Amino acid sequence: RSMATTAGRSLKIGMLPADGIGREVLPAARAAILALGSSIPKPEFIDLAAGFEHFTRTGTALPDETVSVLQQECDCAMFGAVSSPSRKVTGYSSPIVALRKKMDLYANIRPVTSVSLHQLSDCNSTAPISMPQVAADPTAKPDVDLVVIRENTECLYVKQENQVNTEHGKEARATRLITERASRRIGEMAFKTALARPRKHVTIIHKSNVLSITDGLFRETVRAVPSLPGVNGKYDEVAIAEQLVDSAVYRLFREPNIYDVMVAPNLYGDILSDAAAALVGSLGLVPSINAGDSFVMGEPVHGSAPDIAGQDIANPLAAIRSAALMLRHLGYGDGANRIEKAVDAVIREGKVLTPDLGGKSKTSEVTNEVIKRI
Amino acid sequence: RSMATTAGRSLKIGMLPADGIGREVLPAARAAILALGSSIPKPEFIDLAAGFEHFTRTGTALPDETVSVLQQECDCAMFGAVSSPSRKVTGYSSPIVALRKKMDLYANIRPVTSVSLHQLSDCNSTAPISMPQVAADPTAKPDVDLVVIRENTECLYVKQENQVNTEHGKEARATRLITERASRRIGEMAFKTALARPRKHVTIIHKSNVLSITDGLFRETVRAVPSLPGVNGKYDEVAIAEQLVDSAVYRLFREPNIYDVMVAPNLYGDILSDAAAALVGSLGLVPSINAGDSFVMGEPVHGSAPDIAGQDIANPLAAIRSAALMLRHLGYGDGANRIEKAVDAVIREGKVLTPDLGGKSKTSEVTNEVIKRI
Ligand SMILES: CC(C)[C@H](C(=O)O)[C@@H](O)C(=O)O
Ligand SMILES: CC(C)[C@H](C(=O)O)[C@@H](O)C(=O)O
């Protein structure tokens, strides 16, 4: 099902709330999409099962039915968050990792932006430009404006693991897979993304001082993207830097403004996007999409947060922003902009925020504030 | 060569400056050790070759001679820092990774502490208790006091990698090895370390929601340390928590004071210790030791910093502190304390600091300030 066919008819959105606060923030994303009214094709939401809780009830974390409905009926999807078992559970395997692979959603795109930057760039706003009210933590950095482009299908996430018993005890091994094909397509995504941004800068994250073959392949393949046949100098304007992952995390914290687009193998991207989220005040603000060539799935970067689940205090903004990213990816940029401006306005006003941002409001109250402004 | 035999005679210290600023900070460590005078056995420094620059000249990054002198003649060692090739170089392999393995230095111990905490706990000090002068970056956190205990011999650092050509292009694989034996001994080190600290708290870092077998083994083995035969309730006072590595980095930035001892597989420990260093103002402050059952090697956590090498502006404090950690590990706690107090005093006074801490002083000037106070 290609994206082009969605125009003019309904937009079928698979909804996979999964576990914990995933179930509280996905309704917020749904409400935001509905609030766009007729500016997008009429949304049809299809509720689909997945998650650790579903596993404990049924023995499967990702029913075949869910995958086939996504593949055959949906134009896109929204994923909530998944809980992790606190002990090893035989037969359980993360549904989000499986979904990314089964749907070939090879790029995990995670924009992380300080709220104050949004304000400065929001020319239509009449609100005074001031530090955001989200400064529950004064260390929230004002100048973060980056995108983590995370390879989403391989690295240690191929989950090829085994364990043997030896005379010295148990020995476990996992395979880390890096292919030229996957490195190339994630590299292309990074250059394409950078080209559309004002700074046009790509930083390749790797650890090739230790992993000279696997990370060497990643690094060289991404570096070679601008000289691929057919590129024809398109990326000549894009500057390329690289950084070892340990030092990248260090510099992310010390000088976040050196980064524009960061492209990374799967696990480094996982860690880097959480690290970047810490810089802008809360994981509850950071959205993502899992994107393939013919499908896209929005997903807040935060987890299922069992400690606050069920209290109606989860921050819905990451999920709402993920819906906007999903819509933009499908070609509905206007709708995406309307949602994002509404979110930015609510943050800027600073009156109706969840506790992670120093506020006292409920998930539902924040959602309503956003809806009002869409 | 056991540590007990060192008392009463000379202390033979292998010196491996390796590359870049490693060559500028190791003389500072040497000067600090010498300044202790007769309170430790007479130090004898043995200069040893290693590093990328040595590789480019000779074709080997870690001469056999270096390893055999360390094994047969030295009581301990100090390592500087190693440069990484910017492109794949056939035959090159990181000497620090090899040394850790060859000398079986299985624990990389990296204490990260805010300067202001040192001040508060320095009861002999007559200086006013105030925010340190190192606040070149106002986000340096005041309440970091943690130790990263990093497994130092396995994980992806076993460097078992290969690459094949397929019809879809190159495919590279690396093996990630986690053994019960290595997980147990690093776990024991973590509990032992926690027991000696006021908060007595261990956080196990893993990613077992994806790596259920390898990180599952790490997690379960470390968790089982308090109930090992022979432990006899010794660790009953130590509280155990655990955290997924992505969320650990997030929370390290947001709430660093939740951590006391963090124990992690090799690569996560590498990333976490750089992340923690970012919180206290500079990598130039963070020391480490690589410790085995019968040998210890001090090593600043920072890299070879080719961008500032040769300018006499590298911060020598991490290397000096690493010498102190090394001495304490050998049983020379008084000498270690004297060095650490001198370093703390120089930081607290804030007058003679290198540029990474907002100062204008040279490596040699900072070193002299420390020496004066030892
Ligand atoms: C839940 C977990 C498997 C997942 C990941 O590691 O990819 C999560 O941390 C994320 O970032 O989406
Ligand atoms: C130089 C490199 C191989 C090394 C590592 O990754 O262990 C360094 O980053 C460190 O932390 O000591």
Image (cartoon, coloured by chain):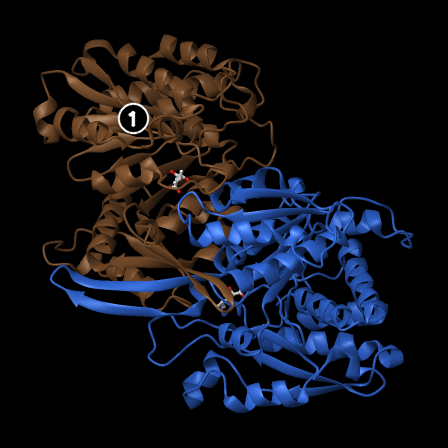
Chain colours: A brown, B blue
Q: Nearer the viewer, residue B176 or A252?
A: B176
Report the residue at 49% width, 22% height from top. Answer: A309
Examine the image and state in which quarter residue B328 appears: bottom right
Tell me where residue A101 appears, x and y as whole percent.
24, 43
Tell me where residue B127 appears, x and y as whole percent.
88, 51
For disc 1, the marked residue is A78
**Callout 1: helix, strand or loop?**
strand
Q: Nearer the viewer, residue B222 or B318?
A: B222
A132 left or right of B11 in image: left
Tell me where residue A342 appears, x and y as whole percent.
37, 17
Q: Nearer the viewer, residue B61 or B105?
A: B105
Tell me where residue A276 appears, x and y as whole percent.
46, 41
Q: Is residue A273 visible?
A: yes
Q: In which quarter of the image is the C terminus of chain A?
A: top left
Q: In this view, does A362 lie above or below B345?
A: above
Chain to which mark 1 belongs: A
- Count of labels in the image: 1
Report the residue at 35% width, 69% height from top. Answer: A212
Q: Where's ligand 1: which quadrant?
A: top left
Q: Quadrant of the N terminus of chain A?
A: top left
Report the residue at 49% width, 83% height from top. Answer: B62
Which amino acid type corresponds to the residue marked 1 in the rendered image? Answer: Met
